[in-house]
Structure formats: structure tokens, C-alpha cells
Amino acid sequence: MDFTSKSVLVSGGSRGIGRAIAQAFAAKGARVAIVYRSNQAAADEALELLAGSGHIALQGDVGRAEDVENVVAEAISQFGQIDILVNNAGIGIDHAVDQVSFEDWQSAWQQTLQTNLIGPANLCFCVAQHMIENGSGRIVNVSSRGAFRGEPTQPAYGASKAGLNSLSQSLALALAPHNIFVGAVAPGFVETEMTQDLFAGPKGDEIRGQSPFNRVAKPEEVAHAVLFLASAGAEFTTGTIIDVNGASYLRS
Ligand code: NAP
């Protein structure tokens, strides 16, 4: 896979899976704009790790429409174009239905949907306008196994990712006539800061045992699937959702 002369925008590219995606694109010759919400030190560190030159870090909250417009405009102004959008930024908040107040329940739903679904929808909209003008583009959305399997303690998370899958498929249909291809990657558990406490705790063995590999995914393994969907030759996969869960959940 070669991404020389391609410009890529990766939301949440400063840490975890997003950082691995940014590194993988940069290693294949792309120029990368990483979007982060607040941890500038992590964003600076991520930039340092990218091969090649000309990469940028842009601060913005994907849950705020004005920030989305700003980061897209800034990336286009600095790179001249965005060829590939990766919607990776996401959050998960515990709000088990039998444990939280109604107030906390509503807050978790609002925050989760705003970041994990409305944010990516707005990024898709703004970047698609530019890609339509350019006559081509790729969009890859980072979903989750939870969209299919359910998320008992984070129902808004599962719903947001199911919505993201549906958004990906709707846009695959709407944008194919514009030569823009849209796919999604649905990881199971991945070794990142989002999950490290969980894996180190009493549930760690059970979680690793969900896969016949007896481990969780590495961020690089998710990145590999993202790059495949964005690569030349993968056009006919548009609308697909790739599972990266080590056979821990096989959907029919
Ligand atoms: P992470 O380690 O917690 O990193 C999250 C990244 O997203 C950070 O760069 C963070 O920036 C950024 N971010 C969060 N909210 C944002 C917002 N509102 N606006 C802009 N940037 C924001 O997460 P991860 O584990 O790598 O997860 C990445 C994606 O994979 C998520 O969509 C997640 O749902 C999905 N996923 C993860 C797993 C897993 O096991 N880790 C499994 C399945 C799917 P700051 O640091 O500046 O806040």
C-alpha cells in the first residue's frame, strides 16, 4: 500500500488506535493531520513519531460543529487537499441502566452520541464537500464490536457505533457516484489507554480469553485494516465493515 502524496485527516490521532493509524499512513508516505481534543503533549509526541515531514496537529472537539469546520478548513489550507478522512476519535462512559441516575444516563447519552456519531457525521459532511469538488476521496470510520454484540454497561457507546456503521453504509451509497468510498472497521478490545485498566484488572483474563488467540488486538492491527480500506484497489469494498476482533465475536 502506497500513500505517497496523499493527505490524511485522523481524528483522535494523538493517542491509542488513532496514533497507530497516523503512524501507519505516514510510514507509507502520506502527510497526516491529527486532530486531538485537549492533550497537546500527547499530540506533540505523536507528531514526533511520524515518519516523513509536513505533518500537523490540530486542536478541536469533534463534538462541536464549529471546531469540525475549523479543523477541516485548516487541514485543507495547509495541505491543499484531504484525500482520506479517518473518523477515529471516540469516548466510552459507564452508565449501566441499573446503576446510574436519570440525569447521569442522559448526560452519558448526550456526550457519547455527540462525540461518537454526530461528530463523525459532521466531519463526513465537511470533508465530503471538499472531496466532491476534488472528484475523489476515502472515508474510514472506526466503529466497534459493541455495535453488534451489545454494550451492557455503556449502551450509548454500542448505539453510537451501530449508528456509525449505518452512517458509513448510507454514505457509501450516497457518495459512490462522486468517486468517494466509505468503509468501517469494528475492533474488539484493543490495547490502549481507554482499556488498559480493564485489562490489568480482575476481568483481564476473561477478556483475553474471548479470542482463540488469548489476547486483545494491537492498535497496529486496527490500523492495517483502515489502510486497506483507504488503499487503491479497495474501491469495491465500499460500504463494508471489517471486524478486527480475533474471532472473539463472529456475526452472521
Ligand atoms: P483513546 O486511547 O482514549 O484515544 C482517544 C483519542 O481521541 C485521543 O486522541 C483523544 O484526544 C481523541 N478524542 C476523544 N474525544 C475527542 C473529541 N471530542 N474531539 C477530538 N478528539 C477527541 O481511544 P482508543 O482506545 O484509541 O479508541 C479509538 C477509537 O477506537 C474510538 O472510536 C473507540 O471507540 C474505538 N474502539 C476502541 C477499542 C479499544 O478497545 N480501545 C475497541 C473498539 C473500538 P485527547 O487525548 O486530546 O482527548
Image (cartoon, helix red, strand yellow):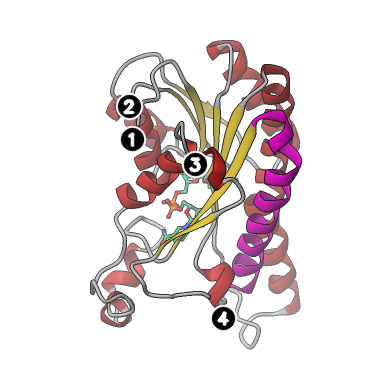
Towards the viewer: 31 or 192? 31
Instruction: Identify the main secondary structure in magenta.
Output: helix
Q: Amino acid at mark 3?
A: Gly
Closer mark to the observer between disc 1 and disc 3: 1
Towards the viewer: 99 or 188? 188
Q: Which residue is mark 2?
A: 28
Q: Is residue 140 visible?
A: no
Instruction: Residue at 28% x, 23% y: name it.
Output: 51
Q: Are marks 3 and 4 in contact (CB under 8 Å)?
A: no
Q: Which residue is mark 3?
A: 12
Query: Distance of mark 1 from mark 2, alpha carbons?
Result: 6 Å
Element at label 1: helix
Q: Amino acid at mark 2?
A: Lys
Instruction: Residue at 61% x, 85% y: name it.
Output: 99
Q: Residues within 10 Å of mark 1 (few under 14, many from 20)?
A: many
Element at label 2: loop
Is residue 14 shown left or right of residue 201?
Answer: right
Closer mark to the observer between disc 2 and disc 4: 2
Q: Which residues are magenta?
A: 151-179
